[in-house]
Amino acid sequence: MARKIGDVIVDLQNISLRFGGVKALTDISFNVREHEVRSIIGPNGAGKSSMLNVINGVYHPQEGQIFFKGALRKKMEPHEAAEQGIARTFQNIALFKGMTVLDNIMTGRNLKMKCNFLQHALYWGAAQREEIAHRIKVEEVIEFLEIQDIRKTPVGRLPYGLQKRVELARALAAEPHILLLDEPMAGMNVEEKQDMCRFILDVNDHYGTTIVLIEHDMGVVMDISDRVVVLDYGKKIGDGEPDEVKNNPEVIKAYLGTSH
Amino acid sequence: MSDARGTAADAASLDTFPRLLMQHARQRPSRPAMREKEYGIWQTYTWAEVADKVRAIAGGLAALGFRRGDRLAVVGDNRPRLYWSVAACQCLGGIPVMMYQDAVAQEMAYVMQDAEIRFACVEDQEQVDKMLEIQGGLPLLEHVIYDDARGLRHYDQPFLHGLDEVVELGTAHAGAHPDFIDREIDKGSPDDVSVMLYTSGTTGKPKGVCQSHSAFIAAARGGCSFDKLSDQDDILSYLPMAWVGDHLFSYAQALVAGFTINCPESGETVMNDLREIGPTYYFAPPRVFENLLTQVMIRMEDASPIKRKLFHHFMDVAKRCGADILDGKSVSGGDRLQYWLGKLFIYGPLKNVLGMSRVRVAYTAGAAIGPDLFRLYRSIGINLKQLYGQTETCAYVCLQPDGQIKLDSVGTPAPNVEVKLADNGEILVRGPMLLKAYYKRPDATAESINAEGYFMTGDAGFFDEDGHLKIIDRAKDVGKLTGGGMFAPNYIENKLKFFQHIKEVVCFGNQRDFVTAFVNIDLEAVGNWAERKGMAYAGYTDLASQPQVYELIRECIEQVNADLASDPNMSESQIKRFLVLHKELDADDGELTRTRKVRRNFVAEKYAVLIDALYAGKTSQYIETQVTYEDGRSNKVSAELVIADAKTFPPQPRKAA
Amino acid sequence: MKLKHTVLLGAAIAGLLGSAVASADEQFIGLPSYRVGPYASGGSGLFGGWIDYMQLVNERDGGVNGVKLTWEECETEYNNARGVECYERLKKKGSTGNSVFQPVSTGITYSVLDKVAQDKIPMVTIGYGRTDAADGRVFPWVFPMITTYWSQASAIVNYMGQKEGGMDKLKGKKIGLLYHDSAYGKESHAIMDKLAAKHGFEVIKIAVAHPGNEQQSQWLQIRQAKPDYVVLWGWGVMNPTAIKAAAKTGFPREKLIGVWWSGAEEDTIPAGPAAKGFVAAGFNVAGANYPVVADIKKHVYGKNKGNMEDKARVGSVYYNRGVVHGIITVEAIRKAQEKYGKGKALTGEQMRWGFENLNLDDARLKALGATGFMPPLKITCADHEGPGKVKFQQWDGSQWKVITDWVESDRPLVRGMIEESAAAYAKEKGIKPRDCSKES
Amino acid sequence: MFYREAGQFKASYAEDARIFPIRQDRIGFWVLMLVLGVAVPLFSNEYWLKAILIPVLIFSLAALGLNILTGYAGQLSLGSAAFMAVGAFAAYNFMLRIDGMPFLLALVLAGLTSAGVGILFGLPSLRIKGFYLAVATLAAQFFIVWALVKFPWFSNNSSSGVVTAQAVTILGYTFESPEAKYVLTFLIVAFMALLAKNMVRSSTGRAWMAVRDMDVAAQVIGFRLMRTKLLAFAVSSFYCGVAGALYAYTYIGTVEPEGFNLDLSFKILFMIIIGGVGSIMGSFLGAAFIVLLPILLDNVVPALFGDALGAGFVSNFQLIIFGGLIIFFLIVEPHGLARLWQIAKEKLRLWPFPH
Amino acid sequence: MQFFIEVLIGGLLSGVMYALVALGFVLIYKASGVFNFAQGAMVFFAALTFVGFQEVLPGWLGLEAGSNTVFWLAFLLAFIAMIVLGVATERIVLRPLVNQPHITLFMATIGLTYLVEGVAQMVWGANVRGLDLGIVDEPIAWLMDNYEIGVSKFDLFAAGVAASLVALLALLFQYTKVGRALRAVADDHQAALSIGIPLQTIWRVVWAVAGFVALVAGMIWGARNGVQFALTFTALKALPVLILGGFTSVPGAIIGGLIIGASEKLAEVYVGPYVGGGIEGWFPYMLALAFLLVRPEGLFGEKHIDRV
């Protein structure tokens, strides 16, 4: 592999998150290094999605600290996380149903677009140039993910697997430093999973994007991850390279104990 | 002469492709030379840009050590940059060797050995992988250049170069040797070999056909003037670059006339891209026209009854008078009005959906086209014509002139081409477009060109009273039944293939008592038919074995038999027995050529047991066959094939004309 | 039947395209009516009476000097935009175009105010509309006849003065003004303030938000303020609610004086027994025992050509108001025919002359069988209003009883205000007032 | 059927992103513009201009405004008429109080005033959604109309509360005839529709739609909810405001606050639902439908039943038909006329094939 | 002080009236997620039908006008009419629109409003009628005499009716099969379907119950202000109650109604004079809005967390 794993880019320390009285995450610490593929696994309800939501500012932990690129991060809104280069996909596809594939992916570029609505209204000069410039970037992503033929299709009409790919494309269009993927392969057949794995690795490889991944398919996780963190009932029960984690007795117990 | 091709004086000096290219770059620098659907739009390259790119690539090749006379293998889909590589190679006096992109590595290895390739320019990772696979057996191969870098990042073989890298080398080279390319172009001679195309090789190993600049330019000029092609025309280039037709239409004629080549986004999007571009000049083998029509008919089945009625009504009108209107013959006013309405409501939209609204000239060749099919396209106003030619003649022998279309002929000899018939009916041709030689095969060259300089096409045919050439079959395929009657298998097969339910037929009968046939059903058409009948089936093999399907095929065969019975020469060739094959004939299994022609002898050998069963009077036969899939895996398919009889008819005298 | 519908449908569509056919001896009157929506109950009575009167003229007299009256209703839903559409739709109908436009909605009146002058169609707004249009020098095409809101307010104050035994007795009194919180309701403010200043009483203005079906807090305020009289300047459901709330608060109904849009059966019946004693102004009176109403019953309902679905409402306040609209319209036609030729259909311009020279004196009213039914009316070039008199009626629990003769308004005061306002308008719009001495 | 798209390829993104990518649509559009802009004023009669075409255009603009808010940004509003009122009265006051105020500038200022009020009433959208928001917008509806009635300053102390629009003069030309008023309205509406189209096809519109379709995801990819929603309120109110001003100046000629009641707000909402939520063209189709339907019923129903039944019956019957037709339309095509048109167009493009 | 108390009591009692109308909204919204704008028209329709029958029945059956028999017969017939209307609405309007966006259903109910208004006036005419329930709208004498606080007997009666209606509904939901099914449906349509609750039956029942509530509301409002078109405007009074109380909460509707009623009266009396009065039209909305800014889910609405 050509890519080099770099320094710690996100460092979560002693994170605890509660909804009302329900504890979603309890005292979890782990870090993500630049350029690596970092997986979070665990049974349903283990707090995996909450973890991603903490990283990109959708949820705010009651306790703990987050260091981003070495600096302590203040409580921030999701759009601020986006501005810092954190993009993500969702467990239940969160595409914009009323828009075409192209428009969905174009939304991923929004932070890089500088024109205001008045310029848009006139659609002349800078606004048009900007649209085109970003369209070119988006077309590269479209080509990269091989979704040329559905470019103008409304996303609602697409099959599940393709929707997932479009969502990835939308996140990629933002040219993120860190890409959070929440079960990108859930509900896919073997072939689609293979494609998606390839795309994830390609992204990691081609753009050097750091990837934080939640996935149920252990085969996939062990194949493509550099390091894996295991959660169970909101607590961390394992962390390390795939082989290490695979042989961790607590992890084995957690997994044997559930139907996954 | 249209001014697009410059003055006569120009023509004299424009005798090689590089010179033609440079001339266009001067004459119409900002006209589009090529377009390619990429990143969602048609990326357009003007003649000036193309010339610059070609110079750069040529410089890069030269920098890599490419020398005059070297051969450059070109493999890939129709991509502008591959066309540029061809031109760049020619600039340096090299010979591009066009290869089929879907050939498996082993097939490629043969050609590359035969042509002593040092340089290869390939499209993408897939082709690079093939090159890497066969590279061990190709000690001469020095450099492999690829166009699309996707997935190749971690390939660190030193002989792999991205085309961009080559262009950079070329730019640097041009800095060091400013007029190097121009000098190289000046060195070129019209008699130099401009390209090597390998014959598909229905029999034996492929042979490299060496064509000179002058031959291809002559063929292209002839065609352009014949159909008045100009720099305003558009063509969609989607047929394999290694096929002579593409080289003539998309490369040679474009460089002569200066029209625009349009490359589709990918194989899957051809239909869509065709519709977007709406070419004015179109070429497709009969198979494509057939498929299109089948699709049209299938889609129309789902239309509302009113629409269906309207459609069929106007198609009848078109059948009645459409072709005559296109040919400029006189047609009654009522029909004209009906046709006009039809054009508004049916033909126009239909042509539009097919992407043929703007088509001015369309050609088909490579195999016989069904007269009904042919007429149908013409009747809705598409100026579809047939041509006849071979790789060895730059695909240029006979053309159908506008207004003189005969459904079963291939037209009159093209400008500057002499055609005559040998005693055995074999067609002989002579003219400026003949091949220079088969590469390293003086024996074969001598064999195919007779003392008077005529190329022996190997096809049998005759001229009708108007001087139009009719092709019957491959001369060597024309055999005799034991009863003495003529057996022209292609002729019979073509008649059968014109039925929408039949995809492929192989007939046997030479030195036999009667004619038998293997049939491949058309899965799409028969599948649809079966669905409407409510029949359940699991895949091709199952469907092919259904008794109703046999009944369907039998009807087709009997219709052909009745037709054959009316032709005194052919009445004995009626098909007595047939079977429907359990698998589709496939190029991957070697049963078809890459241009999808049946390899008759191979099939006969492979399925000898079936032929025996046909002639032994059995009613069924067990067969087991190896099937190769696209990815190279293989599997065995077996079936108990039913053999059926078909009704034959007594010979009937031809009706008085 | 079916064929007929098709024909009619075709005609209707043709009508939509703006063409219409009518023979020359018919006078066309476009009626922008409202029979659905919140004010449908008033609308159905008013337009019923109006149409019945025109029917009467056709049936009994064979038209006006032989000219039959024709009309077409256009539903406005009391909505300005639809009113404008109706105006435009109706204006070209009939052989001479629509000869008079009477929108029966102040909003629509304003919306077409400019248009009528351009199109030369007189607009008659009886008891509503733009008050200062009574100055015919500035508004030659608009006729806010009989009485305007300002005259009415003044007449109501005069009535109070009568009750108190002299205008000077009003000094120091408190008069509550319970008004519909809209442009219509606010029309009362200026005149009441003027009158208050003149007579030395206090006005307590209390707004009721539309639609007015909740007046608890307003009436609590009234109870606190303890006014001597309350003027009910209401519309629609606000009226019965106010009457009921007055009863609930214990405010004597005799001291609750409604304006003419608050004084109909539609306002009292829903209030039930609470309405007994309620007094309201009216430029027409209720009752079916006037000869003109009797004639309608005989000639129209007798032939089963009546417009009212509920015949019991013939003779109600709104119905009779419709009859007044009919009388004025027909009399203007009669007048204009005298000048422009009897037996001929009139243009809007000719009709305007008819209105401007209308003179319904006692004799004429008697001839029409409408003595006491409406006040005598004389319109001049300068004065497009006329008498400005109202009668007061009291609800006795089942019907309206007239309790006064025609009560005058403070003409000089009102006229002064009108002329002032009209002059301001003329100035704003750059209109040069007509010199009425030159009008014939 | 009449679409001949073969050969219409896009060689640049600018071409690909055109409003009408298909040439036939472009031609059709320009023909329509010529008909509406030239032929109609030349050949149409006064009734059609004054009573139908001008209001259709103005209501289209208002519907467009609401469509931006509801259709594109997903914020349901029941207060559009109030924003029209703000525009109408703002334009009146700008014209009245500033000497030599150019009409077009007054129009823009009216729009801006309305936009400002819109932002104010849009603030709750940051906390509440859906019907709660819809009902909350009723606060705007009632409050604004109340305020306009209550404070006589707005109507220049007019005793009746009704104000008369000043003459419309641009560069010395006074727009008086119905034709001139129509052309002016047409040009303004067409221009604003173009601006709206441009907004919705660029990043602004994508932001709106993203917030509409999935606000959490929109935030996660970097859209700011507050800015996006308030911008939608502002732009929407701007459009309604200009529509209101046009209503006063080129249509009715006078304004009274009650004209802009809840009923009108509902009508505008109907326009976008019937026309098509999230469609520029739908706004126009819906406005035409809602304006024309009662007029058509008015003409047709009496012809069918007029002689048989009473006038009250006829009027009520029209109301029933109107309500019934709206329900019928919602059932048959919940996505509105624009979707019907889209389907028809798809059919025409594929003709003679069914799919 | 008396005055304040009087205003407060009056406001609370008006609030009960608002709550009565809001109740119909809540029932339908809870069961089918439809924001039924036609509730106001249904109130009008119900009242008009009741009065209409009261008028025609004596003639038809030869009964004595104003007798108890006529009253209850008219009530019964009006109730049947409301059931027919409810069931027809479910069948003709809602069922074809199932799974459509809420706004579409909302629009359909506005269409329904026009339709119901048209039908009501077409059948019974546009005449304004009085409705006498036999309870006079007068202040209770001893309160008036002893404390100078005017509390209307009628308003008390209305409050009593509203209270019994709410109690009745509570019993219905708590102790009947349909009621339990209804609560299940309100919680989760899909889940309810999956355990075999026939949604459409539930909807029909709910529309019929809403019709009954409309009838009661219509009769009380009609007795107060007369039976006329303006009854449809009662819906406008109910809407702020709904945002305040939450669309899905019956207690919310009651308490919301009380809050709105009391506060709007107090505002009109104590704030109104400073701004020119007539603020009742918008004040409840502003109040509800201000409240929502603090608690977006309303008084009793369930808190909703977006899961991503």
Image: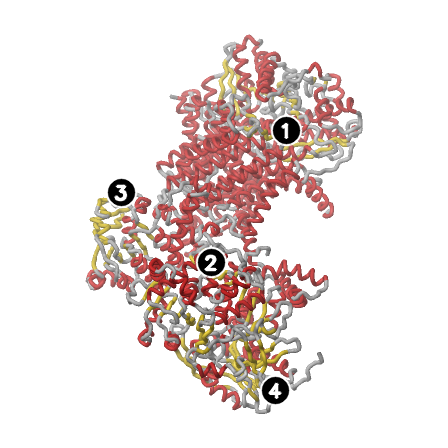
Looking at the rendered image, the disc whose residue lies closer to the viewer, 2 or 3, is: 2
Q: Are marks 2 and 4 on the same chain?
A: yes
Looking at the rendered image, the disc whose residue lies closer to the viewer, 2 or 1, is: 2
Indicate the amino acid at tag 4. Glu
Image quadrant occupied by the C terminus of chain D: bottom right
Task: Tell me where residue E282 appears, x and y as whole percent.
Answer: 45, 31
Locate residue C17: give its quadrant: top right
> Chain under label 1?
C
How would you rate the neighbour count of disc 2 (Cα within 10 Å): few for under 14, some for 14-19, many for 20 or more?
many
Q: Are marks 2 and 1 on the same chain?
A: no
Q: Which mark is residue C115?
A: 1
Indicate the amino acid at tag 3. Lys
Task: Tell me where residue C326 appears, x and y as whole percent.
Answer: 70, 27
Query: Mark 3 and mark 4: span between their CA atoms?
Result: 92 Å
Q: Which mark is residue B25?
A: 2
Q: Which mark is residue B572?
A: 4
Please tell me whether residue C370 is drawn above or below residue B596 in the rendered image: above
- Mark 1 secondary-structure assignment: helix
**Closer to the camera in the image, A38 or C55:** A38
Asked whether the viewer can see residue D5, the reply is yes
Disc 3 designates what residue? Answer: A75
Query: Mark 2 and mark 1: span between their CA atoms?
Result: 69 Å
Marks 2 and 1 in Cβ contact (< 8 Å): no
Q: Are marks 2 and 3 on the same chain?
A: no
